[in-house]
Image: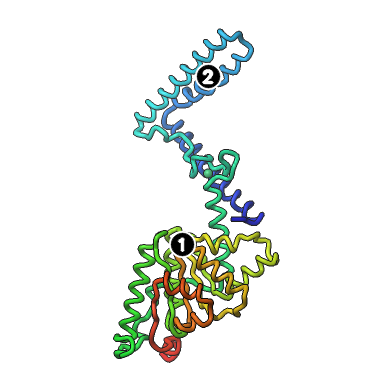
Amino acid sequence: MAYTKEMFEQAQQIIDARREENEAGAEGRRRLFESLEPDYKKWKTEMIDSIQSVLRAIEMSPEKAQTLIEEQKNRNLAAQQEIQVLLRKNGLAPDYLETKYTCPRCEDTGVSDGKLCACQIEVLKNLAFAEAGRKSPLKFSRFEDFRLDYYDDAYDKKYECSPRERMETILNFCKDYAADFDADSPSILMYGETGLGKTHLSLAIAGEVIGKGYHVLYNSAQNIFNELQKERFGKTDTNGQYEAMLLECDLLVMDDLGAEFSTQFTNAALYNIINTRINMSLPTIISTNMNMKELEERYTRRISSRLIGEYAALCFIGADVRQRKKDR
Ligand SMILES: [Zn+2]
């Protein structure tokens, strides 16, 4: 994934702040221990002295140097052991005085083996997703605010249940999906007439899954295609980052598919997103006001067949609840 210069700078600031905080924490513990155990200072000085003494070996003959290094090593170890005795005496862990880095691999420098450390890549990813979230006009919703009583409880012959029963099943499915979400979760196609709560439930899932620490991208199909198009034709400085996020995020929520202005570009992009994510077994949630037949007519068969074949389909039924909300 490519990141902007600002994101790199911001990530480095975050990592630097972590390091400073962790080092200050260790320094604070050392000062506290010093006040608790005056002998600690003595042994600490002893350790530093032993290390400095080794530097004198440079001027010596090889045999003398060898002896000196050996002596100082023992002196250093002895001092370390004395400090451990003091720690034990105070009921403190052996590593109490050491700096506890958030990432021990790079010791919170952001670089390990001359490359960006995994911790810095994680920070960059979080920044990129937060930025994408800020750009999305969609706001998270909650399962608790989903009102089943807005749905008719009269039996519907066509679906062999009432809209309320159907929506209760769908609501429970979505709650379980969010609670159990992991890399193996299936993709979901939410379809049905407008105003039946598809956006509400998909964004409630997105909110919960983000809360679990996953990288989630959510936006309307129209905005997704707009962003992709801008990126493709060099109108942003994102350098392919948005497309990479669409293809690689842990969960993609694409709202209101079918409302976009359909072109060859949008159809090719849609196929690429759906196909790539299925091939990588990455879950996607798509909501649409179109039914299966309309999906087939609007998109090429290769798109509709993948949606119908690979996605768990949730058919929302009932009458537009947004009107009911206004009436009350
Ligand atoms: Zn690291």
Query: x, y (%) of residue 135?
Result: 59, 69
In the foreground, 112 or 48: 112
| Residue topped by disc 1 | 282
Query: x, y (%) of residue 212?
Result: 42, 60
Q: Please tell me in which quadrant of the rendered image residue 54 appears.
A: top right
How many discs appear? 2
Between disc 1 and disc 2, whose residue precedes? 2
**Which amino acid type is shown beneath numbered disc 1?**
Leu
The residue depicted at 69 percent of the width and 67 percent of the height is: 233
Q: How is the image coloured?
A: rainbow
| Residue topped by disc 2 | 50
Per the image, label 1 sits on a secondary structure element best described as loop
Above or below, comparing residue 91 to residue 71 in the picture: below
Above or below, comparing residue 149 to residue 200 in the picture: below
Residue at far front of view: 301
Above or below, comparing residue 324 to residue 134 in the picture: below
Mark in the foreground, 1 or 2: 1
Q: Is mark 1 within 8 Å of ligand 1?
A: no
Above or below, comparing residue 37 to residue 295 in the picture: above
Query: x, y (%) of residue 180?
Result: 36, 63
Neighbor class of circle 1 (other Cα within 10 Å; few <14, some 14-19, many 20+) is many
In the foreground, 37 or 69: 69
